Amino acid sequence: MTRPFVFPGLPTRVIFGHGTLAQVPEEVARLGHSRALVLSTPEQESAAQALAERLGAKAAGVFAGATMHTPVAVTEEAIATFRSTGADCLVALGGGSTTGLGKAIALRTGADQVVVPTTYAGSEMTDILGETAEGEKTTRRDPAIRPEVVVYDVDLTLTLPLGLTVTSALNALAHAMEGFYAPDRHPITEALSRDALRAFHRALPALIRNPQDGQARAQALYAAWGCSVTLGHVTMALHHKLAHVLGGSFGLPHAETHAVLLPHTTAFNEAAVPDLLRPIADTFGTSAGAGLWHFAKSLNAPMRLADLGLSETDLDRAAEIAAKNPYANPRPISRDGIRDLLQQAHTGICPA
């Protein structure tokens, strides 16, 4: 029997296809704006400048200072640029770092956002913002955070480095995984998540063989969209809490941290709700946690927190931080339980 649910709808307009970057100026105009500040990381500044040239008179300039974990100091610098250039909206080109910066600016200024994702990280369809200040990452949700338009251009992912292809996809899979047991889950996101699992399961091995496989790139980007929709409509749990702690307090890289944690957080909660995580086990084989571990290993994903720069002496403090203000979770959270999970992720052993 289908349980009762509430689905608020999908407020974000989505443009998906090949060559859709060309539609960004039209989308800016459709929102009623004429001065877009283009955001990027330093590494993608040339692509941001090219997009600004495409926008022509609709471009207010480029801010290429986005960085991981959305430091508040960087946001304040970007807001100063936003105001000094007379911008009236934002165009964020890049992965989760750039998307996060756009959300942070929008929350403080009320600016509309057009997001152009170039990875599979999957934060663009959400109302979630994680920010870092004084060595701690805090997360908030607000309708003002959710972008107005997301433009998915498969062509922009054809040159995505293989390592980032894999880690950002596993990051997205974590959104789907937590959606299966979220207390506010519903059939719409469950269906999208199941479809995303299958799409990633097909696409990622194909991309290992040929990173420029256009069909596989389209499947992977579609899967990332489905995972992002799920995250934008459900409550986060232990997995995201640990990723925020390790990123905000220990400086670990975002996508890689998600990738390493995913099999272990899945196995931790699988012990309590194996029926809810059955779609993962059915897709990846064996149990959900072990299936994801073997899948990640087959993709040559990072497997150990130790390889990301976390020392074993940091594990106690990380467990204490995570247990202090835990997110709601289907399995009770304790400091010792988290410490054991982190130990397994630190050494990279396959979860039972």
Image (cartoon, rainbow, N blue to C red):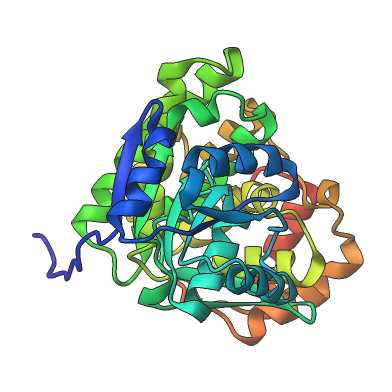
User: Does residue 99 sit above or below 288 in this rendering?
Assistant: below
Give coordinates of residue 36: x percent, y percent: 49, 57
Residue 339 or residue 140, whichever sits in front: 140
User: Does residue 320 sit above or below 84 in this rendering?
Assistant: below
Q: Quick check: can you spot residue 177?
A: no
Residue 120 or residue 277, whichever sits in front: 120
Q: Quick check: can you spot residue 83?
A: yes
Give coordinates of residue 125: x percent, y percent: 39, 56
Count of numbered circles on the image: 0
Give coordinates of residue 27: x percent, y percent: 33, 49
Question: What residue occupies the far left of the structure in this picture?
Answer: 1
Q: Quadrant of residue 110?
A: bottom left
Quarter of the picture containing the N terminus is bottom left
Give the left or right position of residue 213, taking residue 152 as reference.
Answer: right
Residue 311 or residue 135, whichever sits in front: 135
Q: Quadrant of residue 302?
A: top right
Q: Residue at x 42, y 24 (%)?
A: 202
Question: What residue occupies the far front of the structure in this picture?
Answer: 57
Give the left or right position of residue 230, taking residue 107 as reference.
Answer: left
Give coordinates of residue 12: x percent, y percent: 30, 57
Q: Residue at x 33, y 53 (%)?
A: 29
User: Does residue 20 sit above or below 182 in this rendering?
Assistant: above
Q: Residue at x 43, y 35 (%)?
A: 21
Q: Residue at x 77, y 46 (%)?
A: 304
Question: What residue occupies the far bottom of the structure in this picture?
Answer: 324
